[in-house]
Image: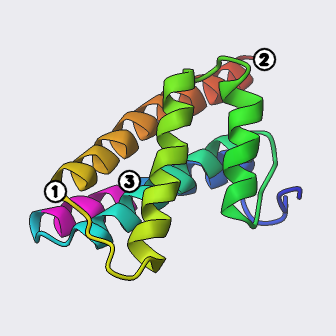
Amino acid sequence: MEQREDIGTRDDLVKYRLKTAKDDLRAARLLFDANEYKAANNRAYYAIFRAVNAVHAMDGKAYRRHEDAIANFNKEYVKAEIFPRKIGRKITQAEEIRHASDYDDFYIATLEEAAEQIETAEELIEMIESYCVNRMEEAGND
C-alpha cells in the first residue's frame, strides 16, 4: 500500500511516526514504574511497531497488518543487513510477548520481560531515528 501524498510530506510522516513511537515508549516506562507489566509490554511493542512504520514511510509504504509491517521490515532491512539480525529477532519476540500479554488468559508478565521489551524499543527507536535522519539529510543534499 502506498502513502498518501496529499497530507504533509514523507519526512513529516516519518517524524510523526518517530514521535508517536517515543510517546509509546514513554507510556511503557510509566506503566513499568507502576508495576503494570502487561500494559508496559503492549506500549513497548507499539513503540517498536510505530518505529518500524517510520522506516516504511521513508519509502512511501504502509501496512495495515502488524505482521505485514514486521515481515517486510525484516525482509527489506534486516535481511539486507541495514539493521542487525539480532534486532529482527527481538522485534519478533516483542510481537509474540505483546500478543500473549494482550490475549492469553492467565498470562503473567514479569518485571524482567517488561524491562527487556522497553530496552528493545529504546534500542530500535535509536537505530531507526538515526537511519531516517541520515536518509533525510542525504535526500536534502541531492
Give residue 135's mark: none
Q: Read off the residue under disc 1.
A: 111
How far apart, in angstroms, are the residues tagged by discs 3 and 2? 29 Å
**What kind of colouring is applied to the model shown?**
rainbow
Q: Is residue 44 above or below residue 51?
A: below
- Amino acid type at image mark 1: Leu
3 sits to left or right of 10: right
Numbered range of the magenta stretch: 24-32
Where in the figure is residue 33, as x and y percent of width and height? 10, 63
Q: Read off the residue under disc 3.
A: 22
Which image quarter holds the N terminus?
Answer: bottom right
Q: Earlier in the sequence, mark 3 or mark 1?
A: 3
Q: Main secondary structure of the magenta part?
A: helix
Tell me if residue 19 is in the magenta stretch.
no
Mark 3 surroundings: few (<14), some (14-19) or many (≥20) residues within 10 A: many
**What is the residue that sits farthest to the right in this orientation?**
1
Q: Work out whether residue 19 can be spotted.
A: no
